[in-house]
Amino acid sequence: SYNTAVGWAAGQSVTTGTTNTLIGAQAGDAITTGSSHVAVGFGALGANTTASNCVGIGYESLTNNTTGASNTAIGTYSMSCNLYGSTNVAIGYNSLAGNVFGSNNVSLGSYTLQSNKRGNNNIAIGHGAGYYIGEDDNYKLFVASHDINNDDLCTITPGSGPNPLIYGDLQGNRLGVNTTLLHSFGTLQVNGALSPTSGNMHDLGFYSPTYDYRWKNAHLSNSINEKIYFN
């Protein structure tokens, strides 16, 4: 069976599961037919039964996972509430900890995507990035660093929180800066002033006899004309 179990009750229920490595008290203690797991830490993958190909490293990482397969959770309490979600990656303390059904999420940083429950295909990078994501949100991107800790977990309002540096719609291919609100008119959207890092040094667009990358129109609210044409 090629199983390795070290620690009190680790792997105690394995029947036909193979190639599992389970280290720590109660690590993988409910696994029956699940195979190819790595569980390191007290209670890691503790409720998993038939799912396979999970990695849980850290105290109670993936501890409630039952049938979610091919998850990777590294960090204390990472993905600790997950039951059925699969092919997620969570790295950091309490990362993706509230997820239950969501799949294909990538959560890098402590408290990232904290309030996600059923959302799929989300990406969060940075401490607390996307911690307030809506419970059912899909295809969202957050790059941020927010001052959040354990004392804040009970006061999170899913779908409401501070603006991240970068926010994106991964399905509609739209990217926002300093916002969580994206409309349908523009691939890049900015909440704030837009300026170059140094004056008289850079161009907007490019044109030569060989290459034509000019902008077509500019719409300005404080101008004589409603539209400016670039030539």
Image: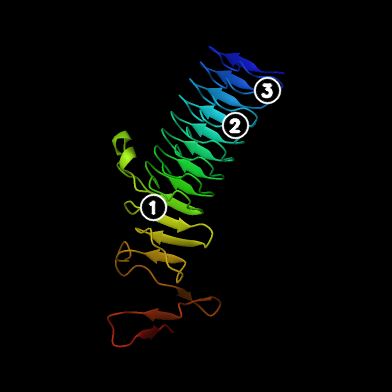
Neighbor class of circle 3 (other Cα within 10 Å; few <14, some 14-19, many 20+) is some
Say which quarter of the image contains residue 197. bottom left
Q: Quadrant of the C terminus?
A: bottom left
Residue tagged 2: 54
**How far across and down, in percent of the image, does residue 88 sit?**
55, 40
Residue shown at the point (57%, 16%) measured from the top left: 10
Residue tagged 3: 19
In this rendered view, identify the residue nearer to me: 48 or 37.
48
Q: Quadrant of the N terminus?
A: top right
Amino acid type of the residue tagged 3 in the rendering? Thr
**How far across and down, in percent of the image, does residue 39 sit?**
55, 24
Amino acid type of the residue tagged 1 in the rendering? Gly
In this rendered view, identify the residue nearer to me: 209 or 191.
191
Name the side, left or right, on which 60 lies relative to 190: right
Q: CA distance from mark 1 to mark 2?
A: 29 Å
**How far across and down, in percent of the image, does residue 114 sit?**
41, 41
Name the side, left or right, on which 2 lies relative to 89: right
Neighbor class of circle 1 (other Cα within 10 Å; few <14, some 14-19, many 20+) is some
- Cβ–Cβ below 8 Å for labels 3 and 1? no
Residue shown at the point (56%, 77%) measured from the top left: 210
